[in-house]
Image: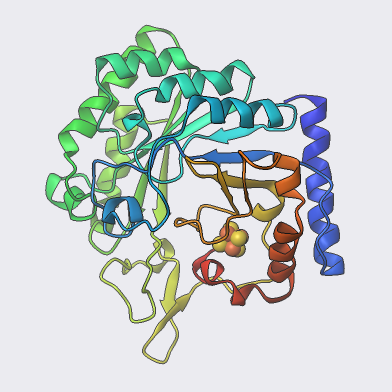
Amino acid sequence: MTWKKLINYFLLLISFQYSRWRKKPIMWGKPTTLSIEPTTSCNLRCPECPSGLRSFTRPTGMLQKDLLQDIIHQSKGTLTYLHLYFQGEPYLHPQFLELVQIADREKIFTSTSTNAHYLNEENVKKTLQSGLKQLIVSMDGLTQEVYQDYRIGGKLSKVISGLELLFKRRKEAGLLFPRVILQFLVTGKNEHQIPELKHWAAELGVDELQLKTTQIYDFENGSELIPKDLQYSRYIPDGQGKWKLKKEIENKCWRMWQGAVVTWDGRWVPCCFDKDGEHVMGKVQEKSITEIWKSPKYQAFRSQLLTDRKQIEICKNCTE
Ligand code: SF4
């Protein structure tokens, strides 16, 4: 954190609160967080994910180093957090850990999400050397049968051995980073494993265990993925035989004032809910980040969020 980054963060906060109050967007800062997609490719076939379903209508491919360098160059003064992930499995990018290094050299906190199928000796070594600060590992089952029910094509033994190797090598090297967050998407099919999971994660030495609610595209008619324990669900029965979002949709979204997502080919989209790039605010190769961030199109999108968020399709299934 630097004074410049801190001041930028406060400018964003003030812009957000002032915009809410006047119901008209104003933007005085620059993005403090970004998610950038290394690749759309994935080795698994998860049923609620466009990478897994191979269902993108936008182009698929791999992020070029030059593009990342350009984004970092433009935003390094204000950017505090870079999540090198959007869709796809980042470790499938042949230069993934070099991408991490580019951001780490500029003292930006780096994070990524992985299904942990590629944590072999070489990748673990490079991960520890890259400066990566946070590694989010998606693992949603403690037995192969439960795990592969959602992570179709996945091998739980690979995830576990990769994690064990990472912890072992991290300890040997006397390093604290990357911190490992184990993310468990709770569904109706794995919720019974939660008590055992807590015990297992503590024994393994996981830095943080996150029990995450699962986004379901067609939730209105219910789904076997919705857990029985509704504390782990984004949805609740509406009393008329259908399901609805647990959280009331309010005309606001802090995310639209603090950060954005960039696809592998430079399309700037509002947030991670826009998986297929329906709301492209601009292309990084064509306009500067500031131009995109403060463009009339972006402001019109923010304006709709402040006045009638329900009209935006991607926001209807969002808990923000
Ligand atoms: S889906 Fe809509 S409300 Fe949710 S984070 Fe994205 S822009 Fe904000």
Q: Looking at this view, is 62 or 81 the one in front?
A: 62
224 shown above or below 159: below
In x, y percent, where is residue 22?
87, 68
List the single residue furthest toward the left: 145
List the single residue furthest toward the bottom: 240
Q: Quadrant of residue 312?
A: bottom right
117 shown above or below 27: above
Question: Which residue is depicted at the point 71% across and 62% down?
Answer: 302
Q: Quadrant of residue 33?
A: top right
Q: Looking at this view, is 197 or 26 the one in front?
A: 26
Quadrant housing the C terminus: bottom right
Question: Which residue is depicted at the point 55% across and 31% down?
Answer: 67
Quadrant housing the N terminus: top right
Question: Which residue is depicted at the point 81% across and 58% down?
Answer: 17
List the single residue furthest toward the front: 286
In x, y percent, where is residue 241?
36, 89
Q: Position of 169 compared to 152: left or right?
A: right
In x, y percent, where is residue 5?
77, 31
Question: Which residue is depicted at the point 50% across and 58% down?
Answer: 273
Q: Looking at this view, is 235 or 8 the one in front?
A: 8
Q: Looking at this view, is 273 or 242 the one in front?
A: 273
In x, y percent, where is residue 56?
36, 56
Is residue 320 in sight in this rendering? no
Is residue 93 in sight in this rendering? yes
Q: Position of 16 compared to 85: left or right?
A: right
Image quadrant of ligand 1 equals bottom right
